[in-house]
Amino acid sequence: MIMTWVFLAFTDYCNAKKLTVNAKKTQVMIMRPGGGSGNGKLAAGESFEYAGLPLEVASSTKYLGLTFSQLSKQHGFASCADVLAKAGRQAMFAMRRRAWELGACLVEQQCMLFDVFVKPVLSYGCELWGVDVLLRPDCSSVERVHRWFCRRVQGLPKQVTAAISLAELGRQPLQSFWIQQLVRFWNRLQNSAADEDRVLGWAFKDNLELMREGGDLAAGSACWSRRWLHVLQSAPPASGTLEWLTELDEAAVIERAAAAYLRKG
């Protein structure tokens, strides 16, 4: 019912502004886990129309370089990272082939080229999907690309642990960079919340309200803010008291996350 009113309001807006919408190129994607009928499909009698024309229901869509699909209750937006892993793997092979042609075969050169050409592909949009990937107990698909590169560039067999292959190169797992980007994004959100005219600030406040649904943080929605809190709680400060609804100390958070990674390893 709510979506019906949204489409009606959208139709009225387009008519008032004399805008035309191509219904054949317009798609609807169900984001909520399970979809309308609980299996990712529309529920019985559920449909979406614009100006009397039916709209296609898509299972995934690409927006600003990220491929979004239906949310998972366990993994959230982690599917974005799975698509980036494929693109990153292609970028890595292309980089290594071109480096070989140019004679840039030293380990130091390969690592520098990886950070310049491959790491940005693997980490694109990590401010959004990073909270979901960091909460997964298994190794993410994007980090597996990084680990493969570290073993390959040193000529190590696949039986060598990731910790050893990273340590030999003096490198950190990609999650350290993601946490850095998340902290910076969080601090920008804190600043935007103070500006009542910024749309980003409105969205951030709404996300916090989702987290507080039911009047209890433990009973609220598993939204982005809650998942970010869980990431921070996985590497708590030595005092045991986590002050998170404020600007965070970037260096301190990264240091705690690195220590938590070593304990886990």
Image (cartoon, rainbow, N blue to C red):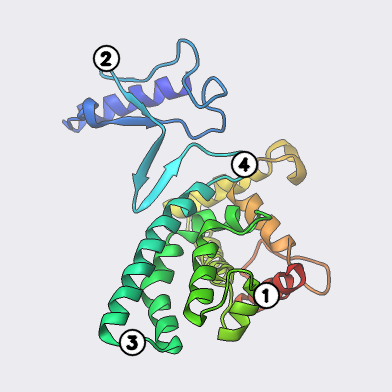
Across and down, in percent, residue 50 comes to 29, 21
Which numbered disc, 2 or 4, marks the residue that appears first in the sequence?
A: 2
Q: Is residue 199 above or below residue 54?
A: below
Amino acid at the residue labelled 4: Leu
Q: CA distance from mark 3 to mark 2?
A: 60 Å
For numbered disc 4, what is the local secondary structure?
helix
Q: Which residue is mark 2?
A: 52
Q: CA distance from mark 2 to mark 1?
A: 55 Å
Q: Nearer the viewer, residue 243 or 229?
A: 229
Amino acid at the residue labelled 3: Ala
Q: Nearer the viewer, residue 84 or 128?
A: 84
Amino acid at the residue labelled 2: Gly
- In the image, which disc is placed on residue 120? none
Amino acid at the residue labelled 1: Ala
Q: Nearer the viewer, mark 3 or mark 1?
A: 3
- In the image, which disc is placed on residue 258? 1
Q: Nearer the viewer, mark 2 or mark 1?
A: 1
Q: CA distance from mark 4 to mark 1?
A: 30 Å
